[in-house]
Amino acid sequence: MAEAGPGPGPGPVGEGPVGAAPSEEAAAVIGATVPTGFEATAAAEVQEKLGSASRVSKDRGKIYFSVPARCLPQVHRLRSVDNLFVVVREFRDFHFREAKEDALKDLEDLVKELPWTDPLKVWELNNSLKKKKTKRKKHNQQSSASKEKVKDDGEEEGTDQKDASEQEDSVQAAEPAGDQGPEETGGAESQNGDDDNEQSEAKDEPCDGSGAETKAGDGKEGEGDAKVLKFRVTCNRAGDKHSFTSNEAARDFGGAVQEHFQWKADMTNFDVEVLLNIHNNEVVVGIALTEESLHRRNITHFGPTTLRSTLAYGMLRLCDPQPTDIIVDPMCGTGAIPIEGAMEWPSCYHIAGDNNPQAVKRAANNICSLLKKNENKESSTSLGIPLDIIQWDICNLPLRTGSVDVIVTDMPFGKRIGSKKKNWDLYPACLMEMGRICTPGTGRAALLTQDKKCFAKALSRMGHIWRKSQTVWVNVGGLHAAVYLLKRTWERAEEKRSFW
């Protein structure tokens, strides 16, 4: 997992003047997990918003970049990253001995040699920012709670939101393994080999825990009985030449961390999550800066297939939206794509639709939840977002010919929604209707599907109106899918009824 951010090769990160200021002024190498296939898109966003060059990891789904620690708030506002961590040190060619005991002993000995000081200062600064954000959030919730008392449906909607979030957590737990193929993910307390079966659930715990105010070395326990930080080690391993498992590496590395810092191991209610990322002979040690994935930001009402906001952002960015563009998602589901688009490209006009009335209702509820959240933000003066939603038939859209600039949508995979058999009729009909509404010559579309064979056949039949310019291979919930970037030709779209 090893290509680190810009700057020198293996070695300490964040070195700078000693004193009170280094935690904010020193450069820190930040690692970010991103949707597989969208590493270049994420790197472009980092360059655009932070002015930092990124290096894409050899291990898919990760990028590294260097920023001043004081830029952490801007880092957390990136739209294309899922999780963040500060790099303690990277080794691009770590020699693992063949015997399991020797290899694990080398990992244990590594702990004493690592430059922990500056990364832990970055972690502390990150916690102080998180503490301020939590205070603002609680204040906003209290002020909005008084308004909610007047409304009869407020309590019920809040319950739906909580249940939906729990549903999303359980789904997300399976995603990391699907991204990497032959990869193991393990977390362990330093003294025992308990498997980490629910990573995402554990990562959600510290949001309300005692970790927000603690410092690395004098962390406060809930009751104040002992001043000690709680931690866990999570190991992500990819490669088939290791003599040990992820859980064994996390267990032994965690034991050395406990001995070195005198922290207390806790698998669920931890303050610090130490990351041990192993990809073949590359090793990266880091400290997590996010407790839950940053893609959980817009959606409160979930459907059977809810697209991650980070993936939605990547698809939209592929189309390079310009001011005044009309962007349409004709199969919006819960609205992840148009909501992300409206938040990031407010100078465009976004239209969303679906043939399922329940999906339209969920999307409308998600838009309402977002508007409420914006109202609660002290600095926000926005009265709305440039987005409309409607129920329609994808094969007969109520839009004028050539009136749309960009189409971005998540097409039915034929698994949880629809069927492979129906896709053979649906896909060519969709491409024809999308071609009709899209502006000839300048229109473009980003379409996500796992039914690649059916899509390729449909696209070959629609070659006179659509040209494929790029294919991005992605992992969606463990499924190998693709995002096709299409360009609209100058040909007039004919309304054919027989496609095959």
Image (cartoon, helix red, strand yellow):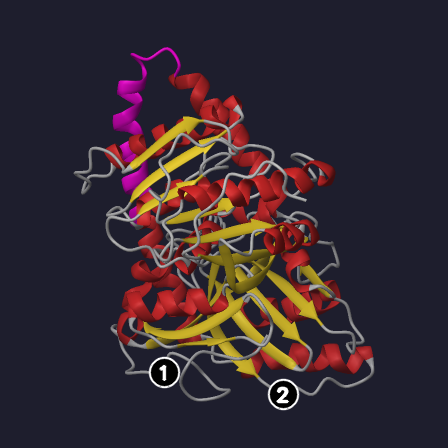
| Residue 93, label in figure | 2
Left or right, 415 with reference to 442: right
Identified at 64% across, 55% down, the residue is 456
Residue 241, position as x, y percentages in the image: 78, 78
Please report the bounds of the magenta region as a residue range. Answer: 132-153
Name the residue nearer the viewer: 217 or 164. 164
Q: Quick one: label 1, few (<14), some, or many (20+) residues within 10 Å?
A: some
Q: Is residue 260 above or below residue 209?
A: below
Magenta-colored stretch includes residue 324: no
Residue 201, position as x, y percentages in the image: 59, 44
Q: Locate the N terminus and report the quarter of the image it occupies.
A: bottom right
Identified at 60% across, 69% down, the residue is 276
**Total marks drawn?**
2
| Residue 430, label in figure | none
Identified at 27% across, 46% down, the residue is 348
Determine which residue is flagged by label 1: 15
Left or right, 354 with reference to 101: left
Magenta-colored stretch includes residue 143: yes
Name the residue nearer the viewer: 201 or 361. 361
Q: Quick one: label 2, few (<14), some, or many (20+) residues within 10 Å?
A: few
Mark 1–mark 2 distance (CA, rounded to whole Å): 22 Å
Residue 453, position as x, y percentages in the image: 70, 53
Amino acid type at mark 2 = Asp
Amino acid type at mark 1 = Glu
Q: Locate the C terminus and report the quarter of the image it occupies.
A: top right
